Amino acid sequence: MTRAARTAYVFFVPVLAITAFVLVLPTVLALALSVTDYSVYALADWRNLSFVGLGNYLYLLREPLFWRALGNTALFAILGVPMAIGASLFAALLLNDVTVRWKPLWRVLLFTPYVTSVVATAVVWRFLLNTRFGLVNRALAAAGLPAVDWLGDPHASIPAILIFVTWKIFGYNMIVFTAALSAVPHDLMEAARLDGASRWLRFRHVTLPAIGPTLLLAAVMSVAGFLQIFAEPYVMTMGGPAQSTVTILYFMFDEGFKWWNLGQASAVAFVLFLMILALTFAQARIGRRYEWL
């Protein structure tokens, strides 16, 4: 073994070890627990633990709340990912314009919600969305529109949480898109402008191909994030009203830490893992088609 090879092992073996300990080992343990009836009784005495095979997965297929949580999570992802990425890209393009002043200040202000505590911001948004005293409903009243019970109406609870989540997280992708926009070739952009290309055509044929890999990364991260949404509905609505904001992770939390059915919770975790893996694989295939990978 050469000296260069030994140096390479010194750097990547610790990374592989940490990755295996933090990612691979929990996944394997979750898979192992998902085929057992591991519960609070097994915590007290391992002799209460038994192998149930696919029993936990068959239970999920028969559980209506699991399907409700699956539907709610899909709705969060389908609506939330375009909202979050669209808002981030729009803000990044706006701040990338030469006519905008105080760009660092705006970037800091827009990034601040991302690093602020979920609980603290949720309390503020609960006030803003309050049916009687909230500023949102006061703005609707000023426009002549009726008040909305944002957190008490099953039809308004998901849009209310989506608005909060988009506001909370869009600053992160905005910073990523801002870095990608700085790498867009200026000569190509100037050539397109001299050829008379409109703003939309310059974005479509110059900017978008240049930031494609970053857009793919943001999509992969956003899909995974929205499929794992938990803290926002837990703090703002406790899964209500009428279980309209119960998500997959919320259902897993209840099974594991409210009812202490840790085997069933592990089965939910493994199902969620397979969902994210499949969607990431599909997004990677799309990225390869557009040569973003």
Image (cartoon, rainbow, N blue to C red):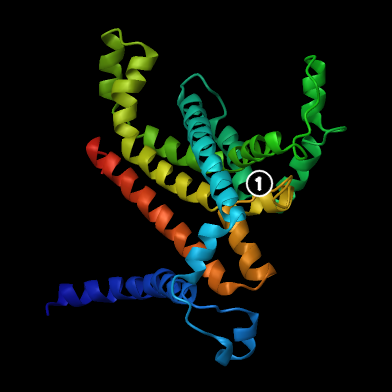
User: Whole-percent x and y of residue 34?
Assistant: 48, 72
**Residue 196: % across, % down:** 30, 7
| Residue 267 showing in the rendered view | no
Using a 10 Å C-alpha cutoff, classify the residue at mark 1 as few (fewer than 14 neighbours), some (14 to 19) or many (20 or more): many
150 is higher (above) or lower (below) than 258: above
Reply above or below: 95 against 49. Answer: above
Check disc 1 and give the amino acid type: Thr
Q: How many marks?
A: 1
Q: Residue furthest right?
A: 132
What residue is rendered at 47% in x and 81% in y? 51
Q: Quadrant of the C terminus?
A: top left
Seen at 60% across and 85% down, the residue is 42
The answer to whether residue 259 is left or right of residue 133 is left
Where is residue 143? Give x, y as percent: 77, 15
Q: Residue at x 80, y 30 (%)?
A: 135
Which quarter of the rendered picture does the N terminus lie within? bottom left
Determine the residue located farthest toward the front in the rendered image: 62
- In-image side of 129 versus 221 (left or right): right
Mark 1, residue position: 245
Residue 231 seen in this snapshot: yes
Secondary structure state at the residue bearing disc 1: loop
Q: Position of residue 285 (x, y in %)?
A: 27, 44
Q: Residue at x 49, y 64 (%)?
A: 58
| Residue 6 located left or right of residue 145 | left
